[in-house]
Image (cartoon, helix red, strand yellow):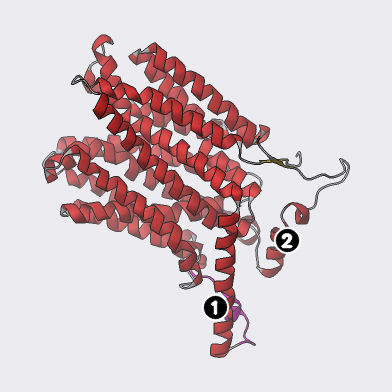
Amino acid sequence: MSQTQTIHQSPSTEIPLSVIRPEAVSSSQNTPSSTPLESISNFALILRVTSSILAFFTAGLNDGSLGSLIPYILDTYSLSTSSIAFLYLSCFLGWVFAAISIPFLQTYLRLGIGGILLLGASLQLLTQFIRIWGAPWPLFVVSFGLAALGQAYQDALANAYIAQVGDKAHRWLGVVHAAYSVGCLLGPLAVTAIATAKPVHWMESYGALAGVAGLNVCLVAWAFARELVIKTRHDQNSGEQGEEGEQSDHARRENAMWRDIGEVLREKSVWIISFFFFFHLGSGITISGWLVAYLLTLAPNSGIQASSIGYLPTLFYAGNALGRLFLIESTHRFGEKPMILLYSFLCTILQIISWRLSSLIGSVVIVCLLGFLLGPFFPAAITHTKLLLPSRIITPALSIMFVIAQAGGNIFPAVTGILAANLDGGDGGGARVLQPVVLGLLGGMMGAWWFVPGVVRRSE
């Protein structure tokens, strides 16, 4: 059964912060600021939130552009379709390396949130430059790992930052994740327009992505300039000088790092939510990646030209963005735990209808609704995670969650492709396996979320 973390208290007594989050009180006594809102001006806060929005938009542009450019990649490098798996594998390894390296960057290199965000933005810019000049295939594959590494650095740190900007953090999480969906929507349109106009020089389409990535670097450097490095006690305490003081501070930071890593690995909620993300991202990427192939099996009886179907996946991302903007408030108000279960149930019903309907128009409408209902899942789950875990382990916890999510985002589209190839009778009908696969993923997602501990929040 699902669990609920309840704080038993007299109805007339206000629950103090020290009861709900003891570490919040202790940390506020040791650091100049306990939350971003308390330490910086409104302009600086707006600047940092804007930078986070641009970071997610940049990631969405990169991720959304791959599908549209696969035909050009296969032709330029004379590859078979199966070779594209190397790009996804490279991306996954980038996320794995990020999860491992973030604690060490903070502990040994003393990189602050600004330093890691800037490193992530710079890696994404470097990636686009590697691709523009037509890198050889091995280096082209590596560029996807570098892009994923940069995205992982920015995603983990930006999510952790936005989750702590105050009582309205859930709204801002909805906005930044909507920016990712908008990037996924516009990315295919932008690169397709450039590649179609210059098919021989299609790699110039990465120039547009490089321009946005450059803005990302500049805005991060401006917004988080004061947070590039971590100021330690040795830096701030003039009474404790010399090599002995520095070694003492280094030992404290190293012990804290291993303590936090151990706490994350022992926290059951981290693993349950990770599996939720595993199925959630797996379902979203499987839908967007195989939707065109599936709709083509319905096109002959629809009266719609097959050439127009390639643009239909953008409707999924449009619904996703709208869901993150318009459903996030009601999701937070009524509770992330019950609302995500409700949305999951509705998605399952819609998926069953789509499977039985076998209509192109009906399937497109249902895909839009699925995107809308799935939209708030990611930001809402992060908000719920913030309520369950101590703030000091949010970043490493999110890093692990995102790695497992990326595993789902790479495994399930590949499994769908294998099943489609084995069931294909030569007419492309194997893509119909998308329907039962997505139904199973939605069921797995709902089952995982059922076991996530609930929280009882004080009414506002």
Per the image, label 1 sits on a secondary structure element best described as: helix
- Residue 168, percent across and down? 63, 44
Give the magenta part as a residue range. 229-240
Could you say which quadrant of the image residue 186 lies in?
Answer: top left
Residue 35 vs residue 26, the one in the foreground: 26
Regarding residue 215, the answer to whether it shows in the image is: no
Q: Is residue 446 above or below residue 35?
A: above
Badge 2 crowding class, 10 Å Cα cut-off, few under 14, some 14 to 19, many 20 or more, is: some
Task: Report the residue at 18% width, 21% height from top.
Answer: 426
Q: Which mark is residue 25?
A: 2
Task: Report the residue at 33% width, 50% height from top.
Answer: 91
Nearer the N terminus, badge 1 or badge 2? 2
Question: Which quarter shows the C terminus?
Answer: top right
Residue kind at label 2, given as amino acid type: Val
- Residue 394, percent across and down? 57, 55
Q: Main secondary structure of the magenta part?
A: loop
Question: Which quarter shows the N terminus?
Answer: top right
- Residue 57, percent across and down? 40, 44
Residue 49 vs residue 438, the one in the foreground: 438
Q: Which mark is residue 250?
A: 1
Task: Report the residue at 23% width, 35% height from top.
Answer: 192
Residue kind at label 1, given as amino acid type: His
